[in-house]
Amino acid sequence: MQTVHTVSDLRVALRPRPDWALVPTMGNLHAGHLGLIARARKENVPVVASIFVNRLQFGPNEDFDRYPRTLQHDAELLAEAGCDLLFAPDEAEMYPQPQTFRVLPDPAIADMLDGAARPGHFEGVATVVMKLFQMTGPRHAVFGKKDYQQLLIIRRMVEQFALPIDIIGLDTVRADDGLALSSRNGYLTPEERAQAPQLQAALRALAEDARLATAPEQIRLLEQQTMARLDQLGWVPDYLTLRRRSDLQTPTALDLHQGAACVVLGAARLGRTRLIDNLEC
Ligand code: PAF
């Protein structure tokens, strides 16, 4: 596997092959990321992974400074996983000027849930993903469904800007006890790590109970009860909610009646760590 750090070297490395599959990451790779590489390889095109911890998508009091940076180990994992090219720019390469031109995602899908809790987050994500798309010109790009709202926003961005990129969403990879793999799991103390699967269990229970609901008010009550249960277990829940998969809006009575495809999404803080997860239902 070749590693490049500049856009000009990247373009030279990409040139000999017409089609690539891109796996954008922020590094500190785990089995979930390696699953994205494996999925990308199924497209039978060479795979380029990017590693860049994107300051634009972190709020002022978030974990940008302590976000784990493990480039050398990541490169070894990527090479073992069959990745062909690694693009690992530094901040000056990605943002040689202050990034005053931005991609502003539709507030209807970007200002709720994680976007409400993390103002500007999805603008930062959309901007860097657009830049990565411009830099690599991929035919395919693979993202994990753990960041469900991010995936929807990227799909919409690609549709609305008519980008010729096939966006592939991959199911969340979980530890044996159900915890969704995430680089942020490394922040958890051993006690918190043992407790962490409670978020997934709460989502599962909400999805189960919501199946019997016929009115949006019932769903709202179930969401409140689920959040209260997590709160009692020592979490600080941000949201636990049932939404339509298509646009992440609250399902109407008709949606519930017609069994519209839904997803339960949750975000909650355990100690100093904010975890997110979701479950299609
Ligand atoms: O999902 C991530 O790791 C990041 O949000 C992404 C897509 C690499 C953009 O920085």
Image (cartoon, rainbow, N blue to C red):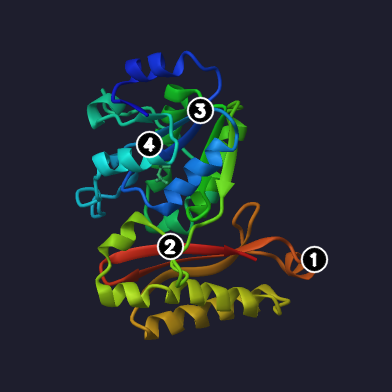
Upstream in sequence: badge 4 or badge 1: 4
Upstream in sequence: badge 1 or badge 3: 3
For disc 2, the neighbor class at 10 Å (few under 14, some 14 to 19, many from 20) is many
Q: Is residue 179 visible?
A: yes
The quarter of the image holding the N terminus is top left
Foreground residue among 197 and 46: 46
Q: On the image, numbered disc 2 is attached to which residue?
A: 276
Disc 4 from disc 2: Cα separation: 29 Å
Q: Secondary structure at mark 1?
A: helix
The quarter of the image holding the C terminus is bottom right
Upstream in sequence: badge 2 or badge 3: 3
Q: Quadrant of residue 45?
A: top right
Q: Which mark is residue 79?
A: 4
> Which three-letter amino acid code belongs to the residue tagged 1?
Gln
Ligand 1, image quadrant it occupies? top left
Which dot, 4 or 3, sits closer to the camera? 4
> Which three-letter amino acid code belongs to the residue tagged 4?
Ala
Disc 4 from disc 1: Cα separation: 46 Å
Upstream in sequence: badge 4 or badge 3: 3
Residue at position x 58%, y 41% in the image: 168
Spot occupied by residue 245 in the image (x, y as percentages of width and height): 64, 56
Upstream in sequence: badge 4 or badge 2: 4
Q: Quadrant of residue 84?
A: top left
Spot occupied by residue 210 in the image (x, y as percentages of width and height): 65, 76
> Which three-letter amino acid code belongs to the residue tagged 2?
Ile
Residue at position x 44%, y 47% in the image: 34
Q: On the image, numbered disc 3 is attached to which residue?
A: 46
Q: Is residue 201 above or below residue 273?
A: below
